[in-house]
Image (cartoon, coloured by chain):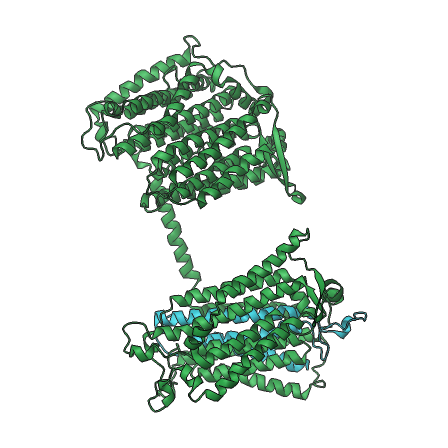
Chain colours: A cyan, B green
Amino acid sequence: MELTIALSIGVLFGSGIWLILRPRSFQVITGLLLLSYAVNLFIFITGRLSVNKPPLIIQGEVVDPALYADPLPQALVLTAIVIGFATTALYLVVLLGSRGLTGTDHVDGKERDSEE
Amino acid sequence: MTLLLLLLLPFLGCVIAACMPAYARNREAWFAAFIALCGLLLTFSLYPAVSSGIVIKHELAWLPMFNLNLVLRMDGLAWLFSVLVQGICLLVVLYARYYMSPKDPVPRFFAFLLAFMGAMQGVVISGNLIQLVMFWELTSLTSFLLIGYWHHRADARRGARMAFTVTSIGGLCLLAGVLLLGYIAGSYDLDTVLASADVVRAHQAYSPALVLIALGALSKSAQFPFHFWLPHAMAAPTPVSAYLHSATMVKAGIFLLMRLWPVLAGTPEWTWIIGTAGVCTMLIGAYLAIFQHDLKGLLAYSTISHLGLITCLLGIGTPLAMVAAIFHTLNHAIFKASLFMAVGIIDHESGTRDMRKLSGLSRLMPYTATLAIVASAAMAGVPLLNGFLSKEMFFAEALLVGPSTNWWMSAAAVLMGVFGVAYSMRFISVFFGAKATELPKQPHEPPRWMRFPVELLVLCCLIVGVAPQLSIGVPLQTAAASVLGERLPDYNLAIWHGINAPLIMSVLAFALGILLFKVLKYRFNLLQSIHIPVLYRFNGKQAYESSMLILASSAARLERLFSSRRLQPQLFLLVLAGLFASALMLQAMPDFNHAWSVDNVNLPFAMLWLVGCTCAVCAAWQAKYHRLAALMLVGGTGIVTSLTFLWLSAPDLALTQLMVETVTTVLLLLGLRWLPSRISARQMNLVASNRDKLRRSRDLVIAIIAGSVMFVISYFVLLHPANFTISNFFLDNAVPGGGGTNVVNVLLVDFRNFDTLGEITVLSIVALTVYALLRRFRPAQESIGIPAQQANQVDPASRQTPAEQANSGYLLIPGIYLRLLLPVIGISAAYFFMRGHNLPGGGFIAGLVFAVGMIIQYMLAGTVWIESRLKLNPHRWIAVGIGLACFTGLGSLLLGYPFLTTHTAHVTVPLLGEIHLPSAFIFDLGVFAVVVGTTMLILIALAHQSVRSHRVPGTQQDNSTAANREIR
């Protein structure tokens, strides 16, 4: 389980890094999406993995932390996901505006001499 | 308390004045005058206490743990300066009422003026050094705004920038100096610092502290070599020049030197730095004043010269010199303010300030001429006027400098007197001679009340000049006593001291001054000369401009050297830096002797991530040529992520991720339409160059390394035993403290709701930014036309509007289902929202669910059809949401609890039974509204572009059909 998720985070992160180094703005936005999955998952697993232990308190019993997943990273990641949507939207609009103004979808606003 | 009111009143007035309508010239002036009058009366009410030697103090706790408090402190010196600040402000406001043209935006003017008054008042009554520096910088800032008031004029902008640069650099030096001084004295409290004078002077850091403080004070008071900013500040409206640049702000440096005189003065360093600057300034200023052609320029240089005189007196450092300095500060403020106002009247009535054009004004405006002549006589130091008395005292002190054989100071003093007489002659020459004919306007007397402030000030000149002891004796003595303490010397403010050396010096100065003026005028053609003899080479302005130019160009060079505007290299360096940082971290990793076990690999979970990883890698591969495919693949990874959250006990996250995934995909789909079509290199038979291959290999290596590093770190984190640091607190207190069993939701809306408030604010800002950016959106020319898929002539659906397609076309059946789905989704949203506190759900999830429901309707029937039936107003949703969240927070303040404290109530409602109703519920409702509003605003704004762009003129589209086409 640990190995699987750690490997997956690595793969997602690597794909994201590859994409943000690409010259086309759509590639970069895709890369940012993948990076945000990887980073969100990473923050999430700092609370360690727990199966069938959602942080929903069973009322009337003494709270035993071992019975519940760590709620703190979950709360952090929840807001991160929503903010991630907002920044994606912002980036998309900047991308479209830049494309309209410069006539190209290269991230630098102009084509390099040798097309990649 | 009075002190606090004295300080706050101008700032309050500033805010109110700024809100008044632009044409309310009278109301503004009356209001500002009222504020200044109140301040003046408050100051006068403190006089009995101050004159009996009491230091009034008011302390407010600011940062008590650092021993920093807001201290207001009023003694004799502060009182005298307060009267100056408030009194001249009152007169200037009255004057400005007539001076400002009806076209000028007066609210800005009076607001800035009042803000300046407050800042200056703050400098004067600060009892804490850091606080003093703060107000000091505030005076620089307001001065900048006032000089640049007519910001359509290049000279005003440049003058404002120059003044601000010089004085704020000085202010930084002052801050450093004050920090040093506070360090030496062990406290920033003024009284403590004043009491530890001997310690300060003996300390080894005394010299640096003195130099830094002197830099601050000298640059503020326009002393040599920083004097050049003041003449350029004359681009300000004349009331500003009269108030800031002659009477008050430039005196702030003098005030500081006086304030710290007991601590810093009395050493050779003090005398050399302050004295030399003073002597140079007074001579250079007076000399340059003679050769000006602009009336205000002459007054500016004369101000520099007089400030130099005061600085010089402070540099001499005897107690009697201090009395003379305070006295001259007061006198100079009175006569110089009146002169500036008189010049303003001349400018206002005749349309020019050029002395080469003006002449014979005494016949055109006799009253103003008389007033100006009397005031300039005071400036020259004619007996029976106030300038004479303080000048005599200066001469007397100059004689005492050094041993009796040392006469250079006396010579410098007389020389200053000679120049002073000469430029005063030059000034009044505009009133005599033939009547000027070629003026832009025909001059005449100004309105009665415009002249009144000048009259009052000139009257003051006369009263002080004739009966000094009676009029100004006691306040002056109080002020001097507050600086000098027990060292207050005996002195006699009288007009006639018998025939003594100072009197002879005065007479000599007059005779030589008149002679100098006549010689210059008739032999050297002073009135038309362009060059200033000897000193024209030393141009402070030129030096300033060239140093600014060097600074800007070297900054640009550095930027070119060390940075790039291109995104790719920036991101590349960022990734490299990140890898470097993690390499450092790997070294510090603790040893793990866990085996790389594959025992607990859960097969279904591994298969799930096999899909997820494949999607991610394929997306990375396909993102260039197959955007839609890449988008779907990324969505696949998102779904796997969502499932992982569900698997690993985070149902809230799973729901949020699922919903965000949906809206993100819709968002990017809407964007795809505006991107250029891209044909793959293979189809075009292009071969990648070696450089490109190299770069791709490089990036691939970096991506693989980065991924591996991330994997190692994640794995180490997971193998590390868990330590619940603060999480247990939330688990323990969710039910008793927050009243909810869903700890994640309680965390968001209760424990850390301030964070959430910040987050929804960010969301709203982003949504509004997106909206604003899209309003000015100009798509690329090739994307404007209708996409090929929609323009297919064979497909009958392409000739229908989306609404027709959904209501009678091929989408009829899905249309009916999806419309039925809206209430279902609405109910689910409400359900998720209501149960959020106890079970997975809450404002974020419910908001996203609801937004998705709405978007489906948009996608089905098109924007036009939906919006003609349903007005959603996402802006209002956002406003209501933020409002709800804030008011919930403020509500707890009303009840005496800290901001955003949550309260839980249980309400019994018929039919529904007992409802659990915490105030966090209302907060969560705010979150819900904001999430719905932002999501809808972003998506709809983007969707609208497709409808709008067809109407862009100049496209070949047939407008009648194109207008009906919408995005779906």
Q: Nearer the viewer, residue B742 or B486?
A: B742
- The answer to whether residue B670 is left or right of residue B54 is left
Q: Quadrant of residue A99?
A: bottom left
Q: Position of residue B639 (x, y in %)?
A: 58, 81
Q: Position of residue B664 (x, y in %)?
A: 51, 76
Q: Residue at x 60, y 75 (%)?
A: B829
- Rendered position, A84 above or below B551: below
Question: Is the N terminus of chain B in the top left, top right, bottom left or bottom right quadrant?
Answer: top right
Can residue B923 be seen by looking at this rendering? yes
Q: Quadrant of residue A94?
A: bottom left
Q: Quadrant of residue B837?
A: bottom right
Q: Position of residue B880 (x, y in %)?
A: 54, 62
Q: Nearer the viewer, residue B452 or B857?
A: B857
Q: Nearer the viewer, residue B154 or B163?
A: B154
Q: Residue at x 55, y 33 (%)?
A: B125
Q: Position of residue B429 (x, y in %)?
A: 26, 24
Q: Nearer the viewer, residue B908 or B795?
A: B908
- The answer to whether residue A15 is left or right of residue B356 is right
Can residue B703 be seen by looking at this rendering? no
Q: Residue at x 55, y 69 (%)?
A: B931
Question: Is the C terminus of chain B in the top left, top right, bottom left or bottom right quadrant?
Answer: bottom left
Give the residue at the far top of this rendering. Answer: B498
- The answer to whether residue B479 is left or right of residue B587 is left
Q: Residue at x 52, y 64 (%)?
A: B878
